[in-house]
Image: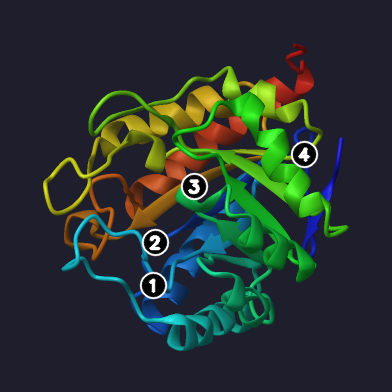
C-alpha cells in the first residue's frame, strides 16, 4: 500500500480520512479563502485531513455559454493566496499537457478530469512534474480498467497517485455509483477517493447545463467512507443555487460541519476493521 505525501499530510487507505473540498469554480481570492478557512476549521475540529480544491477553468461545460472561470493565471494567484493564508495544500484540474508544469509550480495536486483519464500525453506530462496526481476514473471505464491509466503515470517514475471514482454512466443524463469499484481500485495499492458530489450529477440534465441531486451526496460520502478509503471529494459553496457551476450537486457550506463529524465516525469504524476483498 502506497502512502502519498501531500504537503505535510500523509494519505493512505488505512490512515485518517482526507477531505478534498472547495467550490466547483474559483470565483475570487476572498471567496476561496473564506471556504478554505471554514473547511480547515471543520476538519481540524473533527480530526480530518484537508486539501482545498477549486477549478480555474471548467473546460468541459455542457454548453458554449457556460461560465468557465478565472483562467489559469488568475486562478493560480487565488490558489497561492489560499496556501499563503490558510496553509493547506491545494488541488486543481488540468486539461492540456502544456498546463502541467505551470500549475505544478503552485498546486500540490494536479487533477486529471474523468473525461481525460485516457489522454496519454496529459498523464505523462502530469506525472513528469513530480506533483501528486489525482486521476478520476472516466464515467465510461470499469474500475478494473484503471491499472492501464495508472501505468501511464507510473511510467514517469511518479508514484504519488490518487485514484477517484465519480460514478459510471447509466443511461442518458444519469450516473450510478458502484461501491465495489472502490475496493477494486484499492487493489492497485494507491489511495482511493470517492467523489461524492459529482457522483450525483445528472450530466447535461438541464439542457444547457448539468443537473444533480445534492441531497444524495452525503449518502454517497457515508457509504464510501464506511468501506475504509483514503479520501472523499466534496464540492461545497455557501449558496449553491447561485454558484457559477455545478450548484445542483454541491453541499451547502453550513452543512459541512455535521457531515464531516459523521464521516469521521464512519472512518474510524471502517479502519478499525478493514474490509478484505
For label 1, the SS is loop
Sequence-first tag of 1 and 4: 1
From what the image shows, is residue 147 above or below residue 70? above
CA gap, disc 4 and disc 3: 17 Å
Numbered label attached to residue 23: 2
Quarter of the figure with residue 123: bottom right
Q: Which mark is residue 114?
A: 3
Pointers 1 and 2 in contact (C-beta within 8 Å): yes
State which tag comes first along the sequence, 3 or 1: 1
Give the image location of residue 45, x and y in percent: 60, 51
Q: Quadrant of residue 140?
A: top left
The local secondary structure at tag 3 comes to: helix
Q: Circle 2 — which element?
A: loop
- CA–CA distance between discs 3 and 2? 18 Å
The nearer-to-camera label among 4 and 3 is 3
Labels 3 and 2 touching (C-beta < 8 A) = no
Q: CA distance from mark 3 to mark 1?
A: 19 Å
38 to 200, vertically: above or below? below
Q: At x 51% / y 53%, what residue is drawn?
A: 116
The mark nearer the N terminus, 3 or 2, is 2
Amino acid at each position: 500500500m502506497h502512502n502519498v505525501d501531500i504537503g505535510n499530510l500523509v494519505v493512505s487507505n488505512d490512515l485518517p480520512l482526507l477531505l478534498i473540498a472547495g467550490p466547483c469554480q474559483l470565483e475570487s481570492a476572498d471567496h476561496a479563502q473564506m471556504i478554505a478557512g471554514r473547511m480547515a476549521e471543520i476538519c481540524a475540529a473533527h480530526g480530518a485531513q484537508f486539501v482545498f480544491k477549486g477549478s480555474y477553468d471548467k473546460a468541459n461545460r455542457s454548453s458554449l455559454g457556460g461560465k468557465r472561470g478565472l483562467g489559469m493565471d488568475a486562478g493560480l494567484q487565488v490558489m497561492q493566496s489560499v496556501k499563503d493564508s490558510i496553509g493547506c495544500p491545494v488541488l486543481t484540474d488540468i486539461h492540456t499537457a502544456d498546463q502541467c508544469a505551470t500549475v505544478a509550480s503552485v498546486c500540490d495536486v494536479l487533477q486529471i478530469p474523468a473525461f481525460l483519464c485516457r489522454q496519454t500525453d496529459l498523464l505523462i506530462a502530469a506525472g513528469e512534474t513530480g506533483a501528486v496526481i489525482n486521476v478520476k476514473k472516466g464515467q465510461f471505464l470499469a474500475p478494473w480498467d484503471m491499472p492501464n491509466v495508472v501505468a501511464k503515470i507510473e511510467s514517469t517514475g511518479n508514484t504519488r497517485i490518487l485514484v477517484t471514482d465519480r460514478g459510471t454512466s447509466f443511461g442518458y443524463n444519469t450516473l450510478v455509483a458502484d461501491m465495489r469499484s472502490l475496493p477494486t481500485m484499492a487493489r492497485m495499492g494507491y489511495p482511493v477517493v470517492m467523489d461524492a458530489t459529482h457522483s450525483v450529477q445528472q450530466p447535461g440534465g438541464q439542457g444547457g447545463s448539468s443537473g444533480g441531486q445534492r441531497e444524495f451526496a452525503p449518502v454517497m460520502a457515508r457509504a464510501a467512507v464506511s468501506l475504509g478509503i483514503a479520501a472523499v471529494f466534496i464540492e461545497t459553496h455557501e449558496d449553491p443555487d447561485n454558484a457559477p457551476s455545478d450548484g445542483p450537486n454541491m453541499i451547502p457550506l453550513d452543512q459541512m460541519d455535521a457531515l464531516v463529524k459523521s464521516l469521521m465516525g464512519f472512518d474510524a469504524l471502517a479502519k478499525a476493521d478493514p474490509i478484505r476483498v
